[in-house]
Image: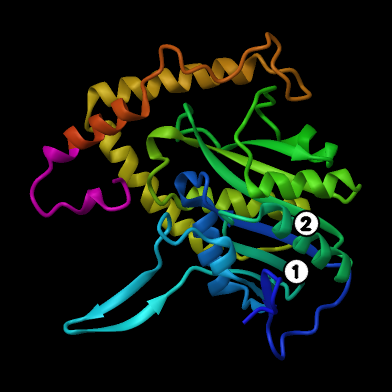
Amino acid sequence: MPLSGEIYERVANGPTVPGGLPLVVLLTGFTDAGSAVSGLITHLNDSCDPHPIAVFDNDLLLDYRARRPVMIFEQDHLSEYRPQRLELSLAHDALGQPFLMLSGYEPDFAWNEFTRAVLAFADEYEVSGVAWVHAIAMPVPHTRPIGTTVSGNRRELAASLSVWRPRTQVPATAGYLLEYRFAERGDQVAGFVLLIPHYLAETENPDAVIAAAERLMTATGLMLPVETLSAARDEYYAKVNQQVQGNEELAQMLHTLEGRYDAYMAGRNPDGAEADGGGFDEQDLPSADELAAELERYLATRPPGDDDKRGLG
C-alpha cells in the first residue's frame, strides 16, 4: 500500500531506470475515439515488455461507480477481480531502446497532486521530453489519412503534422494539465489529438492505434512495433468499405464527407492554417447518429450469422 498521504506506491525491486529517457503518456477516460489510446496501451503492454516502477492508488484517484472494475463469475463463485491500473513503467521499443510509459485510466480526482507526482518523476529520471496522445470524433471520412491537431511547445511538429488549428474552449483533461505544467516550466512536450471519423468513433479501429503510435514515434524517435497491426487494419477497412458499397445512401454520405474534407485541405496554407479562417464544419454533414443508423439498417439486411457486425457496433 502507498505510504500515508501518497497517491502512488513504488514497486519493490522495480527496474533500474537510466536517465534521459522520453516519457510517453497514454490515459483513457474523457475521449478515446476508435479506441486509439486503450488499443495502444494493450498493444504496448503485449509487445514492449513494460516493468512497473510505480502504481497509483485507485482508492484516491478512481471513481469506482463511474468506471467499475471487472469481476469474473465462474458458475457458482467469483474467481477473479480485475481492478483498473494507472502506472509508470519502464518499457523497450522494437530496437530495445528504453522509454518511460505512464499508462492507464485518467484520474477522476486529485489532478493537481497527480500532476505534481508525474513532474517529480520526470525530474527524478531526468526525462528528455514528453509526448502524449488522445483521440476525438470529427466529421471526416475514413478514406482519407487520420489527421492530427498538435499542441505543446514542439513547433516543428505542429508545423509538419497539425491539420486543424482551432482557437476554442475545450474541456480540460489530466493529459492537458500535464502538458500545460510541463510547458510552463520549459520542458519539451508534445500533445497529439487524432481526428477520427465520427461514425467509427465507437469502434475498435486498428488504424487509430497505428496513427497514435506513429505520432509518438515522430515525437520521441522510438520504434514502436506496429507492423502486426497492419493486417487487422486492412481487414477492418475492408468490412467498412463493404458496408458502404452495399448502401447507396451511406455511400452518398461518405462522398459528401470526402468533398468537404478535400475542400478544407485544399484551402489550407502551407503552414497548416486555414486560408479562410474555416475548419471542419459539421453543417450539411451527416451526423454520427445518421451514419450509425445507416450502418444498422444495412446490417439488418445481412443474412443471419453474418459476422460483418464485429467491430462496427
Q: Quadrant of the N terminus?
A: bottom right
Disc 2 residue type (three-letter): Thr
Q: Position of residue 305 (x, y in %)?
A: 11, 55
Q: Position of residue 111 (x, y in %)?
A: 67, 53
The image shows a total of numbered marks equal to 2
Instruction: Look at 82% across and 50% down and name the residue there.
Output: 182
The label shown at residue 99 is: 1
The label shown at residue 220 is: 2
Q: Is 61 left or right of 289, judged from the image as shown? A: right
Disc 1 residue type (three-letter): Phe
Range covered by the magenta-colored residues: 299-313
Instruction: Look at 88% across and 73% down and name the residue there.
Output: 19
Q: Position of residue 47 (x, y in %)?
A: 57, 73
Q: Nearer the viewer, residue 113 or 145?
A: 113
Instruction: Look at 17% across and 84% down and name the residue there.
Output: 76
Where 78 falls versus 256 (above or below)?
A: below
Q: Nearer the viewer, residue 206 or 112?
A: 112
Residue most toward the bottom? 13
Give the prevailing secondary structure in the magenta stretch. Answer: loop
Tell me whether the residue at label 1 lies in contact with that at label 2, contact meaning CB atoms closer than 8 angstroms: yes
